[in-house]
Image (tube, rainbow, N blue to C red):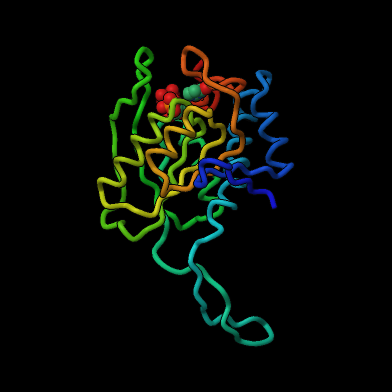
Amino acid sequence: MTLRQHKKFKNFYTVTHPLLQHKLSTLRDVKTVTKEFKELVSELTMLLAYEATKDLPMTKARVTTPLETFDAPVLAGRKPVIVPILRAGLGMVEGLLALMPGARVGHIGLFRDEDTLEPQSYYFKIPPNSQERQFYVCDPMLATGGSAVAAVDQLKSEGIRKIAFLCIIAAPEGMEKFCTAHPDVQVYCAGLDRKLNEHGYILPGLGDAGDRIFGTK
Ligand code: PRP
Ligand code: URA
């Protein structure tokens, strides 16, 4: 089993697979350059998404192989929706689409005020009439938890109920805030780190995810 459920927060899962953990350590390394960083974020997201999608509903469809026709298992229901939190979440979209090429993509624009660390909303767009769809919200970093909580609040206020959250690194502070606010939303992360520093950065972390994905520093 490569999925570890948190003892206190039952909706919080860490994916412990050795390949994923090795990639995460390379991602953290200050020497990892933008191109490799982006590729690793995609690969890590695919491995997280593999676990996060394990309960998608299934049905049967007639499939004819070169030898015979049978009822084969296929995904049921409406296409899921991937929702990156701008901007760093964009780096995770490709990895999710690799596993779910038919998925829709919404966008939630939030940034942290550098002084208050409070999330500021600047964009919100999801497909209409999506209340029945499964949503996958993604952001590499769950730090104070303010951005992720606000993103899920916005989706819930639109009537969305089936939501999972994927992140690469979480701080204990963000896990607690998110899991307390949204105990019905399953969280899948690659690394639960030690703590936040005085500027709200995760330790040991990986630095500023958006800047490392887009090469803006
Ligand atoms: C980063 C990160 C999260 C947020 C996490 O985004 O990508 O969205 O901080 O912090 P929180 O859990 O304390 O809210 P940032 O605000 O730096 O914006 P960016 O992605 O546009 O760089
Ligand atoms: N956002 C980041 O990109 N990194 C952190 O460590 C915390 C918030």
Answer whether residue 81 is visible to the viewer in this image. Answer: no
Residue 43's quadrant in the figure? Answer: top right
Residue 78 percent coordinates (x, y): 39, 64
Going 53% across and 71% down the picture, which residue do you hit? Answer: 74
Residue 60 percent coordinates (x, y): 52, 78
Residue 144's quadrant in the figure? Answer: top left
Going 64% across and 48% down the picture, which residue do you hit? Answer: 3
Q: For the image shown, how many numbered marks are present on the structure? A: 0
Query: Would you say 215 lies left or right of 3 here?
Result: left
Query: Would you say 91 lies left or right of 112 here?
Result: right
Residue 120 percent coordinates (x, y): 30, 25
Vertical comparison of 107 with 26: above or below? below
Vertical comparison of 176 with 183: above or below? above
Going 37% across and 22% down the picture, which residue do you hit? Answer: 112
Q: Nearer the viewer, residue 8 or 90?
A: 8
Going 69% across and 37% down the picture, which residue do you hit? Answer: 21
Answer whether residue 74 is visible to the viewer in this image. Answer: yes
Q: Which residue is farthest bottom?
A: 68
Vertical comparison of 179 with 116: above or below? below
Residue 49 percent coordinates (x, y): 56, 49
Q: Which residue is farthest front?
A: 8
